[in-house]
Amino acid sequence: MADKRRILTLLIPLIIFLMACFFLFKGLYTDPRKLESVLVGQDVPEFNSPDIYDLEKSHGTEIFKKQKLLLNVWATWCPTCYAEHQYLNQLAAEGIYIIGMNYKDNHTKAIKWLTDLKDPYKISLFDKDGMLGLDLGVYGAPETFFIDSTGVIQYRHVGDINAHNWKNELSAIYENME
Amino acid sequence: MLAEIGQFTLIIACMLSLLQTFYPLYGVYTHNQSAIESAKLLTILQFVFVSLSFLILSYLFLINDFTVTYIATNSNSLLPWYYRLSAVWGAHEGSLLLWAFLLSLWSTAVALLSKRLPIESIARVLAVLGLLSVGFYLFVLLTSNPFDRTLPYFPIDGRDLNPLLQDVGLIIHPPMLYMGYVGFSVAFAFAIAALMEGRLDSAWAKWSRPWTMAAWVFLTIGIALGSWWAYYELGWGGWWFWDPVENASFMPWIAGTALIHSLAVSEKRGVFKSWTVLLAISTFSLSLLGTFLVRSGILVSVHAFATDPTRGLFILSFLILVIGGSLLLYAVQASKVKSRGRYSLLSRETMLLINNILLVAALIVVLLGTLLPLVHKEIGLGSISIGEPFFNRMFTILIVPFALFLGVGSLVRWQRQELSGLFKPLAITLLISTLATISFLFTFASYFTWLALLGVFLGMWVLTGVGYELYVRATHRNSLWKGLTKLGNSHWAMSLGHAGLAVMVIGITMTQNYSIERDVKLEVGGSIAFEHYDFHFDEFNDLQGKNYTGNVGVFTVKHDDKVIAVMKPEKRIYTVQRMPMTEAAIDAGFTRDLYIAMGEMLPDGSWAVRIYYKPFIRWIWFGPLMMGFAGLLMMTDRRYRVKKNKNAVVQEA
């Protein structure tokens, strides 16, 4: 009997540890999702970011309040962005208004990229230190935010936009926005 | 091609560690001698292959192979060669490879240096270490492969190493810290092996003691280096921020400190054994937890928001397997351990028990402070943050009994101490330390605060206690000088380690209470004076570095009208990442540091400049250096070098 009680006492560290694991496990999944749910349905956070072609000129949230649009996060260090770029050119040609956000990147290379590969963006923001990305909760590039004409984020797409996912799901989300 | 070879050797190392886990254990249970003997060879082979892999990655960094994604994101051709080399562990993938490499290094050290141990015990220990290696290899290979290629669109040049990390301190800080973290795996493996064997005796404590001490030394130095790096590189003049990443390294340190003390009791007196095993398991578990917290991005901070749940999930599963498994084994096996030694309420054993209780309390404070915000959010109470004031208050409270008991602890005898015998030592220590405190504050403090009085007194109390104890032991049978030469290395180590803590306590107290920080607006030609110091802003020049440009300010510093230093704080812009960095200028001294950091240029052409006067801040790092040296000294003690008498072990078993 005494031995049994001793084992139970000795089990306490294990029980505490397993409880801690439960919280760690939940923490692993809730954090990014929380960011997502917080942002969808909200205004784009206040910001001030320079234009990629003219670093003296800066943009704020007013650029999101004219029409519905896509905010695309990209960088030259991201191979998937390269693949995505051609499709964005095609979407822009179809008349979709896209704002680009160059994220944590080298300025010269970014300009070279846009001149070489054609620029699909109506406005290009240059987020060199990733502060706007941080406010938006970006985890990497490419990522695209769907923003309606009142400047409210309606959807967030992680990963590249391609002909397949655009036709199957994303275009519907875009069409349904005001 | 080379990158693929690197990955391939890593896979081979993984296979070898898998063999190292199971084949020797199979040998132990079937009494197959050659299988048992194979443990050492497998360990060494595994080390050879992981070293190859590590060398290949380092070489790829040196030759700027930007087809490898990890190198493209963390290095740049303009980087000096030594930073390209330290960039190997500058980010996630490489630091895990470093971790696996060091684990194998420790395992090999155990295989080669433990000739005195019975071969079955070594086989068990190496098998446990092998299992840990398997976990880390799989983690690297499956979720964080540093050899992945960027093909087909590889960049012409890399994105550069984070400028914060381009620093000498950072070349050595992470390997030191990791040596400490990983080193506790040896203590862990010894504990698990002893539990599997069902044999927890003083011999076990004696074997694992020097290994634990070695890991603790590395961790101590690693943390001190990190603090020093933060002080001169971050440009805020702070030396400890209670940041989750820092806490992650501090928790295993506290547990490890408790462990080395508890091991001492287990070795000398044969008590506290099951507690010591639990501490050994906890210390390494906290090292793993630290990795989990830092690497899973679960504690989202401004600097780490690249969260990747697969990595976190992998580490968590690994944690549950390793820690959960060992705690289960502990619950089942430790119940069989019976403590035979007896001790009365007033004895060295009790003193060390108090030391352990206080350290565990400190550990719980840090653990709760780090994890509570997470738990709080999960149970739906919203986000909270526990900041510096909480930790500072708790530690100010805990250090008081800790230092008071430490000062007298080593004067108390093992097993049983008469209370009357303590009056004289206590009275003398109290008298001397009070006098020392008063004269110290009178000389160095410009005004009085209660906290400063308390902190300096605690430091002096410990120093006096240490000195008195040395005096008593030395003059016990001999004259003072002869007696001092006869004291063993581990005795000196204890005294030096405790003195190191005292030095650190005094340093922290003085820095926290008497620092002067001035944020001033200065133009070239202007000056500012305080505390007998006069800072004159002489000139402002351009600066051209290899991978950065910037400006440098030149300040002449006078103390009582005598020029004592010319200080040159810098503002750098790193060309590739376009990241501005502040390089503070520091004039270091034994009793004070002067610290100048350039802020922003103001519209009228003057500069915002931060000037700090930090008394005794060097002592904060000098203390841990003494502790680290003390640990090394302890490992050189005779009893760990003497050839073991074979019969003794058989009897103890």
Image: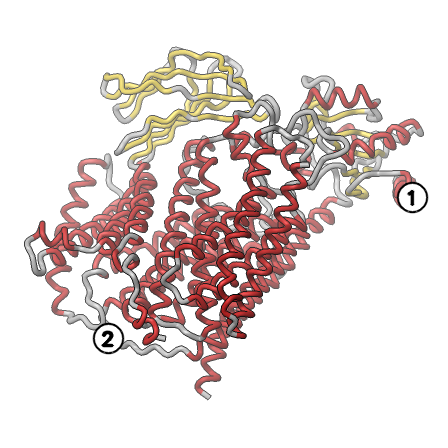
Dot 1, crowdedness within 10 Å: few (<14), some or many (≥20)?
Answer: few
Judging depth in this view, the residue of B615 and B477 nearest the camera is B477
> Is residue B589 placed above or below B187 in the rendered structure?
above
Judging depth in this view, the residue of A153 and A32 nearest the camera is A32
Q: Residue at x 55, y 52 (%)?
A: B46
Q: Residue at x 60, y 28 (%)?
A: B63
Residue B134, quarter of picture: bottom right
Residue B103 % position (x, y): 50, 52
Residue A105 % position (x, y): 68, 28
Left or right of residue A54: residue B300: left
Number of marks present in the image shown: 2
The amino acid sitting under disc 2 is: Ser
In space, the residues marked 1 and 2 are separated at their CA atoms by 79 Å
Q: From this viewpoint, is residue B441 visible?
A: yes
User: Which residue corresponds to mark 1?
Assistant: A172
Q: Residue furthest left?
A: B479
Q: Chain of mark 1?
A: A
User: Which residue corresponds to mark 2?
Assistant: B344
Judging depth in this view, the residue of A96 and B27 nearest the camera is B27
> Is residue B322 placed above or below A80 in the rendered structure?
below
